[in-house]
Image (cartoon, rainbow, N blue to C red):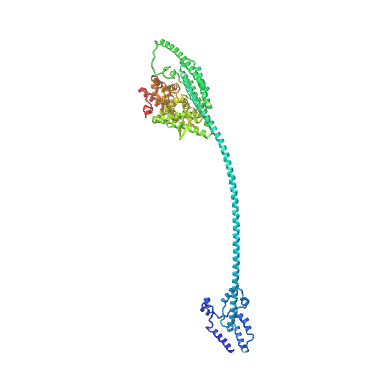
């Protein structure tokens, strides 16, 4: 129809107008797009227009009316114009009905939502568009229904599989739990069976243990009874042995005392012209016999009854020997007295006795005097009896060292501990002696006496006794004597007043334990040979250092000590010796004589004056000796002592001065001034630090 052509022209004109260019889409509100933004874009046809034009319109217009042929051709040509109805960018299978009718309804919906509608459509186009939309809707509904059914089927399968898996898991858990229960039951049965077997075995072991315990208890009771019996026997044996040993010591002490009395008769040998060598030899043999018995018992443990009987026979023989000697001396003295009386009677008319400074040949008070040596040349060597006495003391000291040699060289830790404890118990109390009150001094003395008597004493928080080791008594006696002498060498040398408290304790111990006194003398003679007195002679081939040690010098690393230090040490030891011979322990028995009294001091002084003096040494020792015990000698010997002092001043001083150099005159001047003052006052002063009765009362 012509009107239709005009309609299309109108539509084309409207399209070309400003308003025709406006884009309109019926879904703009759903998409939320801005209308104004689409107005600026060019009008577009629907994406389905090309498909409709190619497939739908040709089929519907196969037989159009003749009157409309021209209009159709025009419209067709118009539609074919790109400016009016543009086609789809390409006619691809994507726009075919088959492609659009996919089972996936969501995809078709998505495509329909993004397709752009035609701007200008005819009624047929609208119809086609409606068909398309209907077809899409049906296809989408079918796809949705299929998808829903497929989803339901899948969900049903998943639920079935899940239920089946759950049931299988339950069955697996049940089987696992059943297996666990079976294993636990089997394990419990095995454990119960093992426990029953262990209990049975334990009961069996308990029964065996009880049986063995009964047997062991019986054996232990028997062993304990046997041990107690042996301990009791050993205790009785030790007690009997200790009684015998103390008896032997008493016998030895008496034998040595008797032997000293034999030696004391030596001055009568020259005066009475007697041969006393047989008595002295036999006395020495008896002393050696008793010493050998004690040495053997020290090595073997305790003396036997036979050893005690032999010692008693030796003592009796020594007494008989001394009695015989005294009888011989008495006879000789009587004969000598008659001869002297006859000679004196003949010479009485010719000459008179003159009193002078010289000492007579025989002095009744001292045990050993100067003899007739004043007017003769002085000796260089000491008397043989003195050297024998010196050698006996050194032999006794060596035997004592050999007696505890095993204890000294022992590698056993227990023996070393015992040795250390014994040494401390012996030396510490001596180190504590000083010018303290008498009560403290008595405690120290009692402690040393208890230790030597075998009683336990406290030392360093432990109980110590010489019975801890068979060689303990020998070791303690040796170390104790060594410590006394060392105190004289060090303490007395620095503090002269300390000589008296140390000496009174040493004298008391010497009186109760004579062997300690002999060891004190042995140590004193070894360190200070001038206390014998003994001046060692230099022998050919002897090393100079050895000779210096014999003289009493200390030699260290080939260096000899200074003369001042040497004289100081010698002075300390002589002062201690001078204090010992005049002091006695005040709490001891007064019935016994001093074990080493003033008669030995007189003997020492006489032998010093009968020996050639030594430069610096003799003057020093004479001064120290006379300052300490000069007062006691004066009271004991009175006139004889003053004759001795005059002899020193008039005869011995020139000899000392002749050998003393100008640099060594200090000791000589000090001795000379001391003796001159004593002669002037006719009294020797009491030494400083002498122990008085007030000391013991404090």
Mark count = 0
The residue shown at (59%, 45%) is 197
Q: Is residue 100 above or below residue 241?
A: below
| Quadrant in the picture for residue 626 | top left
| 381 or 367, nearer to the observer | 367
x%, y% of residue 40? 53, 79
Which quarter of the rendered picture does the N terminus lie within?
A: bottom right
x%, y% of residue 470? 51, 29
Residue 38 seen anywhere in this rendered image of the structure: yes
Q: Is residue 208 above or below residue 675?
A: below
x%, y% of residue 56? 62, 82
Furthest residue in direction right, as rendered? 62
| 342 or 212, nearer to the observer | 212
Q: Is residue 403 above or below residue 275?
A: below
Q: Is residue 414 left or right of residue 675?
A: right
| Quadrant in the picture for residue 58 | bottom right
| 30 or 301, nearer to the observer | 30
x%, y% of residue 51? 61, 80
| 94 or 78, nearer to the observer | 94
Q: Is residue 311 above or below residue 40?
A: above
Residue 568 seen anywhere in this rendered image of the structure: no
Which quarter of the rendered picture does the C terminus lie within?
A: top left
| Quadrant in the picture for residue 647 | top left
Q: Is residue 237 left or right of residue 581?
A: right
């Amino acid at each position: 129809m012509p009107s239709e052509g005009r309609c299309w022209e109108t539509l084309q004109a409207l399209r070309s107008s400003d308003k025709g260019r406006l884009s309109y889409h019926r879904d703009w509100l759903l998409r939320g797009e801005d209308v104004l933004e689409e107005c600026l874009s060019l009008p577009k046809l629907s994406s389905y227009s090309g498909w409709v034009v190619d497939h739908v319109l040709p089929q519907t217009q196969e037989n159009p009316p003749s009157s409309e042929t021209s209009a159709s051709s025009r419209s067709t040509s118009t539609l074919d114009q790109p400016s009016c109805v543009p086609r789809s960018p390409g006619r691809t299978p994507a726009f075919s009905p088959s492609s659009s009718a996919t089972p996936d309804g969501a995809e078709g919906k998505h495509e329909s939502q993004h397709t752009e509608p035609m701007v200008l459509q005819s009624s047929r186009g609208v119809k086609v568009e409606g068909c398309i939309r209907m077809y899409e809707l049906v296809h989408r509904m079918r796809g949705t229904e299929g998808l829903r059914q497929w989803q339901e089927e899948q969900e049903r399968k998943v639920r079935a599989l899940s239920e089946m898996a759950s049931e299988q898991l339950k069955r697996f858990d049940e089987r696992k739990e059943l297996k666990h229960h079976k294993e636990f039951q089997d394990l419990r049965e095995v454990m119960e069976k093992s426990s029953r077997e262990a209990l049975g075995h334990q009961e069996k072991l308990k029964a065996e243990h009880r049986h063995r315990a009964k047997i062991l208890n019986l054996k232990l009771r028997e062993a304990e009874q046997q041990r107690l019996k042996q301990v009791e026997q050993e205790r009785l044996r030790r007690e009997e042995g200790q009684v015998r040993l103390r008896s032997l010591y008493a016998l030895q002490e008496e034998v040595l005392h008797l032997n000293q009395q034999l030696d004391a008769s030596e001055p009568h040998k020259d005066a009475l012209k007697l041969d006393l060598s047989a008595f002295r030899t036999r006395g020495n043999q008896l002393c050696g016999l008793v010493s050998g018995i004690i040495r053997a018992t020290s090595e073997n443990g305790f003396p036997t009854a036979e050893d005690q009987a032999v010692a008693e026979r030796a003592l009796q023989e020594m007494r008989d020997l001394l009695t015989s000697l005294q009888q011989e001396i008495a006879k000789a003295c009587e004969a000598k007295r008659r001869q002297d009386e006859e000679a004196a009677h003949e010479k009485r008319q010719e000459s008179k006795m003159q009193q002078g400074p010289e000492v007579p040949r025989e002095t009744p008070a001292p045990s050993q005097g100067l003899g007739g040596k004043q007017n003769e040349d002085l000796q260089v060597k000491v008397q043989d009896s003195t050297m024998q006495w010196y050698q006996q003391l050194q032999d006794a000291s060596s035997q004592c060292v050999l007696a505890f040699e095993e204890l000294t060289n022992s590698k056993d830790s227990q023996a070393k501990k015992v040795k250390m404890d014994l040494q401390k118990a012996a030396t510490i109390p001596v180190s504590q002696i000083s010018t303290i009150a008498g009560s403290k001094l008595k405690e120290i003395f009692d402690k040393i006496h208890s230790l030597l008597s075998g009683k336990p004493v406290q030392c360093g928080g432990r109980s110590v006794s010489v019975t801890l080791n068979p060689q303990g008594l020998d070791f303690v006696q040796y170390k104790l004597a060594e410590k006394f002498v060392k105190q004289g060498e060090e303490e007395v040398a620095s503090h002269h007043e300390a000589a008296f408290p140390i000496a009174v304790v040493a004298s008391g111990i010497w009186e109760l334990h004579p062997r300690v006194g002999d060891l004190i003398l042995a140590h004193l003679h070894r360190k200070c040979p001038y206390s014998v007195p003994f001046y060692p002679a230099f022998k050919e081939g002897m090393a100079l250092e050895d000779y210096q040690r014999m003289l009493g010098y200390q030699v260290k690393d080939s260096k000899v000590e200074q003369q001042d230090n040497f004289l100081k040490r010698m002075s300390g030891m002589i002062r201690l010796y001078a204090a010992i011979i005049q002091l006695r322990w005040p709490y001891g028995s007064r019935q016994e004589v001093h074990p080493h009294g003033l008669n030995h001091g007189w003997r020492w002084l006489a032998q010093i004056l009968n020996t050639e003096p030594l430069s610096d040494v003799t003057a020093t020792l004479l001064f120290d000796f006379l300052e300490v015990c000069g007062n006691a000698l004066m009271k004991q010997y009175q006139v004889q002592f003053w004759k001795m002092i005059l002899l020193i001043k008039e005869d011995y001083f020139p000899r000392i001065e002749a050998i003393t150099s100008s640099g060594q005159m200090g000791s000589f001047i000090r001795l000379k001034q001391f003796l001159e003052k004593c002669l002037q006052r006719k009294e020797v002063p009491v030494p400083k630090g002498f122990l008085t009765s007030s000391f013991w009362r404090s």
